[in-house]
Amino acid sequence: MEAQQHDFTSKPAAAHRVPPWLAPLVTVANNGKLHTYFPEWDLGAALRELPARAAVLALFHGDPTATTLPDDAQILLTHRPPHMRAHAGQVSFPGGRIDPTDAHVTAAALREAFEEVGIVPTEIQPLAVADNFPVRSARYPVAPVIGFWQQPRRLPIVNGDETDAILHTPIAQLLDPDSRVTVRWNSFTGPGFYVEGYLVWGFTAAVLQAMLRAGGFEAPGFRAPEVDLSAALAASGNNERPLQD
């Protein structure tokens, strides 16, 4: 989609009222402490403090007046088509590489969200830019931008080359023990979530895990059962390429 007619320069601002149920998460993110809620994923301060090379939009919606997690709380995820060169078949947040023309990290996240799923910047309240999370396989620093969508709507597929499914994912589903696994493959271990027949794993699952903990949504001490990642992917709707040793 053409992005030139939209303003992608909005930064998180004090004028944006933070929904009370998101306030703990936003505070953690603004203080650069999101990584501390999933330290197993962190690759150290040196990588965390590099300029982010990509940005993703963690876009929440739900009752803006609720003081605790509302029943209608959701987060937006997408499925990447299996023909893509990078992260083909994976479930992800809207997002991508930060371009030289992007004014800042938030601008990149807003632009990518528009290009991938058609949400215009005026629909989004940016609330925080969290500390970098790495794509571990490439040691690639990515900045999660936390946003709120006050008037959510069903989204058509506007760019089938980058997104072939849009998942309005209930937070309650992400918290359901039946939706949770720990995936293992060789020396890799990480969280996993089953969403509408897809398996969310890797970077996206790590950020989700950290946000659920930082927001106070996940029960303390929760442990998900372990599954083989290769087998779980084969049984999912991801249509990812087979893992390579």
Image (cartoon, rainbow, N blue to C red):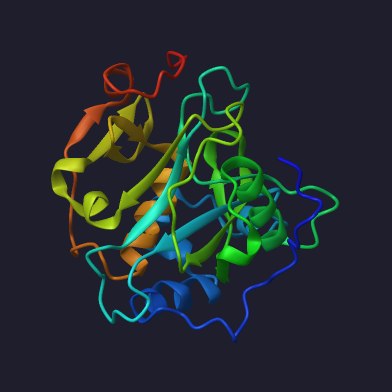
Q: Position of residue 90 (x, y in %)?
A: 46, 30
Q: In this view, does 208 lie to the left or right of 48?
A: left
Residue at (52, 64) in percent of width and height: 146
Quadrant position of the N terminus in the picture: top right
Give the vertical position of 9 relative to 83 (above or below). below
Residue at (61, 57) in percent of width and height: 48
Residue at (75, 66) in percent of width and height: 9
Q: In this view, does 41 lie to the left or right of 104?
A: left
Q: Is residue 10 left or right of residue 138?
A: right
Give the vertical position of 43 relative to 183 (above or below). below
Give the vertical position of 166 relative to 172 (above or below). above
Q: Where is residue 122 in the image (x, y as percent from the top left)?
A: 63, 66
Picture quadrant of residue 239: top left
Residue at (76, 43) in percent of width and height: 2
- In front here: 223 or 102? 102
Q: Position of residue 123 (x, y in %)?
A: 57, 64
Q: Where is residue 144 in the image (x, y as percent from the top left)?
A: 55, 57
